[in-house]
Image: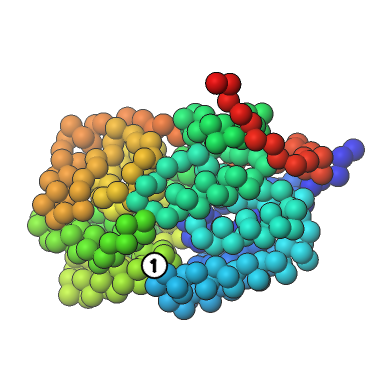
Amino acid sequence: MAETPKICVFTGSRADYGLLRGLLRELQQRDALRLLVSGMHLSAAFGMTRNEILADGFAIDAEVDMELAGDDPAAIAKALGRGVIGMTDALQAMAPDVLVILGDRYEALAAAQVALLLSIPIAHIHGGEITEGALDDAIRHAISKMATLHFPAAEPYRRRLIQMGEDPARVHDVGALGIQNTDAYTRIDRAAFSAKTGFSFGPLNILATCHPVTATGSDPEAGIAALCAALDRIGDCRILFTAANADAGGRRINAFIEAYAKTRPQRAQMVASLGSELYAAALGLFDLVVGNSSSGLIEAPAAGTPTVNIGDRQKGRLRAPSVIDCAEDAAAIEQAIRSALTPEHRRIAEARQSPYGRGATARLIAEALLQFRWREAGAKRFHDLQI
């Protein structure tokens, strides 16, 4: 009988952990899971979400503090360097058969670089996508080129990975893990949500998340200022902001939101992190998702909630019919919000159409990870397309 491989999963933020949670459970049940935790999980400024991981019943095998002390580009680059040093020690000690990485953040790039140099194969989730407004776009493709096995979230992304030279036999379209989360998490009603968060629901309730647009070097406050100006023009509504992530400019966005909410305590509230389960529940409890997070394009449509996607951060990603795109301008945002709240658009959202599949994604990934012969993977070869 073949020995169960040691599968190390990396998580560096609330975003990737929320998506990975089902996969972690699948691997935990098979006694194959090792867990490497870093990045925002270890920062009090971003909710110290390592505690959520522990509360969910997962053992953390290694923690690497990247010391996220600032959010200018130089501070981010130095944090990445500290991550490389710490993850080298952690992965050497764990000696896993494979490192699983989801997505495209700089914390994930640090882990991927280390795995490559230590000859630890990488399995990459959510490769092949395009987000032209974020530096994550280049990071995602870089990790894909380091990876041995791929789990893209849609067929066009599978084809793009093959176009990039990846072996078709090692590229599996399994759908998006986030779609599964909207079905799998226990639904929480509004009373329970309010009790856990202190948020008071009103006639209209908006869930907002605004991250920096890192690829353009634009003022990170411009986008959130435009969003807040638009929200001020919407009538009797309540807004729950989730904090920006630890990208360059993220803390400036969070400071702006905090000041905005402080002057409108009956209208707006900000949380550093809702946690995986509460965020999944919120997608079904709120009337509208607004901002520039990938969750507005992937999870919100599967939950039947309309999305207003602002600016170019997610430019290039597949969209459901329930997503309305608009410019990073207060008037455009206001118009998009009003359009998203019409009965016609609500009916479109209620159809829950999604380009990201609807299946047992976590189980499919876990089975592929367990069945792959990691110790026989050999060196990667570039798969040329026939010309």
Percent across and percent down for residue 151 are 58, 38
**Foreground pick, 289 / 254:** 254
* Image quadrant occupied by the N terminus: top right
Query: Could you tell me the amino acid type at mark 1?
Result: Ala
**Foreground pick, 376 / 330:** 376
In the displayed orientation, state which residue is furthest to the front.
Answer: 387
Percent across and percent down for residue 235 are 10, 55
User: Which residue lies at the image location 72% right of the left edge and 62% below the top edge?
Assistant: 91
Residue ID for mark 1: 248
> Please, what secondary structure does the residue beneath circle 1 have?
loop
Which of the 4 image quarters holds residue 262? bottom left
Which of the 4 image quarters holds residue 162? top right
User: Which residue lies at the image location 82% right of the left edge and 40% below the top edge?
Assistant: 376
User: Which residue lies at the image location 55% right of the left edge and 68% below the top edge?
Assistant: 80
In the displayed orientation, state which residue is furthest to the right.
Answer: 1
* Image quadrant occupied by the C terminus: top right
Percent across and percent down for residue 297 are 36, 42
Mark 1 crowd level (few <14, some 14–19, many ≥20, 10 Å Cα): many
Position above or below: 153 against 232: above
- In the image, taking residue 117 as reference, residue 158 lies left or right, namely left
In the displayed orientation, state which residue is furthest to the top.
Answer: 387
**Foreground pick, 118 / 199:** 118
Percent across and percent down for residue 371 are 75, 36
